[in-house]
Image: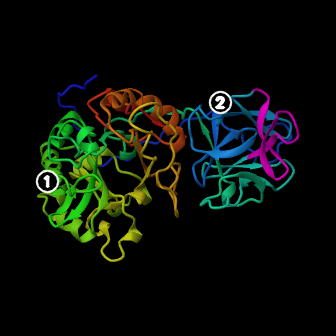
Amino acid sequence: MTTSRSTRFVSLPRAGAVAAAVLAVTVPGLPPAAGAPAGAAAAPGGTLYVQSAVNGLNASDSGGSVALHRPKGNEDRQQWTAAAVAGGQELRSTDDAGRCLGRSGAEAAIVACGGANAAWEITAAGDGTYALTVPGTADRLTLGDAPSGGVYPERPRVGASGPLSRWYLTPAPLPRAAMPPADRRTLDQVTFLTAHNAYANGVDGGFAPPFVDLFPNQSRGITQQLGDGVRGFMMDIHQTPDGAILCHNSCTLVSRPVALWVDLQRMVDFLRQHPGQFVTVFLEDYVSPEVLRSELARVNGLYDVLYRPDQDGVRERGWPSMADLAARGKQLMIFSDKTRGSDPALKRDSFGVMYQQEWTVENYWSMGSGAGSSDWSCYSRWYGAGVNVPLNREESGFRPLFVMNHFRDTAIAGTAATDNGKLLNRAQNFCEPAARKKPTYVAVDRYDLGSPQAAVDQLNGYTVVP
């Protein structure tokens, strides 16, 4: 189904800054069992995930042993319920009655519920994590060393307390609360429709064959995307003698290349005409910082509307309200997938381009090939080869924005329409628990198919509290 071409945007009040409302939600839990030690806490009630705070992976029943797997909703034997027993609590499988997440010697294992190896003393830490301790000992459920050839520890075992023994007990689904009024909702509470490879649309410029020509990621130009309600734009930029050019993999065969500054100018012009609207640009960035700085300098009015979270105290005070951004005329934020360490001299954030890994989390981009079944597992794009930015990353006083990718390797129209129709299901039941937050950006191919805006509208009807 094609979305309406009528303009979709809501004007935000241009009032002064208003602090975000604090929403308190009580998650029902079980009382500590009789005889439980002082400091023991109840695990959340209902279905939950046992999720490593180190890498965001979930404890899964893997043929009778316990392994950490990519979060995958209810599809991979990753869901548990807590039950009070003498001396502590059990974590019972929702797939096999009578089977519990327990231990066998020094290894985590799936054991019969009711036995001595099934109970844990569950203790809450002040940061939202839990310790799962073997009753009467100091040993905890923790992670072992990385397997041979591996990058990060991934096998649960029993061992000493330490950084690897921190676990989230994440409810499924996450508890919800009402969305604050428009003048109080903060940037991280809002969800924005985002166009994957927004430039690859066949309207504004040429493509690089063969696949982008045959299967464009979008079918409408940037100006119409803005009018249709798209507020996040994923763009690939490559360095050529003409500057930062929008193209996929290579610009060599692009017939009508478009420079980044041209599309940015379209966005800035739109924002000037629509006060209170907010746009975010995500750069898959293959240019030098010097070239990128020169490109931005060509955009008239860019720095009047550019929002700089690094200069706004976000890490100390949290994300601002949308009303505050509107009042200050700050309407555009730009991220690069480059890292700070990749820029030894000129830093991109010195001219207003944020390093995305410092401000967001993002799930792996592909759900599979352009046809056939899809993989809905939701895990970090930035995991492995020396980088670890788990989806459930939290910092004291700061919650990263969550970029949720929901597309395939190839943008086949029929598949995109089907996938977009399932966006809400995946967001709520797979990716929200994996990230322990609601997506801030949901990125899709062919946003004009499958009504992804309807899913975004529903996501904007509530907040979540892990």
Q: Is 178 positioned to the left or the right of 396 in the image?
A: left
Up/down of 422 relative to 155, above or below: above
Residue 16: x and y in percent read 27, 48
Q: Is 387 positioned to the left or the right of 142 in the image?
A: left
Mark 2 Cα-neighbour bin, 10 Å: few <14, some 14–19, many ≥20: some
> Mark 1 = which residue?
262
Q: Quadrant of the N terminus?
A: top left
Q: Quadrant of the C terminus?
A: top right
Q: In terms of depth relative to the viewer, which is nearer, 368 or 121?
A: 368
Residue 401: x and y in percent read 41, 49
Q: Nearer the viewer, mark 1 or mark 2?
A: 1
> Mark 2 = which residue?
46
Whether residue 9 appears in this view of the structure is: no
Residue 118: x and y in percent read 82, 39
Q: Which residue lies at the image location 51% right of the left edge and 35% below the top edge?
A: 430
Up/down of 84 relative to 261, above or below: above
Task: Check disc 2 and give the amino acid type.
Answer: Gly
Task: Check disc 1 and give the amino acid type.
Answer: Val
Q: Secondary structure at mark 1?
A: helix
Q: Which residue lies at the image location 88% right of the left edge and 40% below the top edge?
A: 116
Q: In terms of depth relative to the viewer, which is nearer, 74 or 324?
A: 74
Q: Which residues are magenta?
A: 97-122
Mark 1 Cα-neighbour bin, 10 Å: few <14, some 14–19, many ≥20: some
Q: Which residue lies at the image location 21% right of the left edge and 68% below the top edge?
A: 291
Q: Secondary structure at mark 2?
A: loop
Q: Is 264 positioned to the left or the right of 349 in the image?
A: left
- The reply to whether discs 1 and 2 touch (Cβ–Cβ < 8 Å) is no
> Which is the main secondary structure of the residues drawn in magenta?
strand
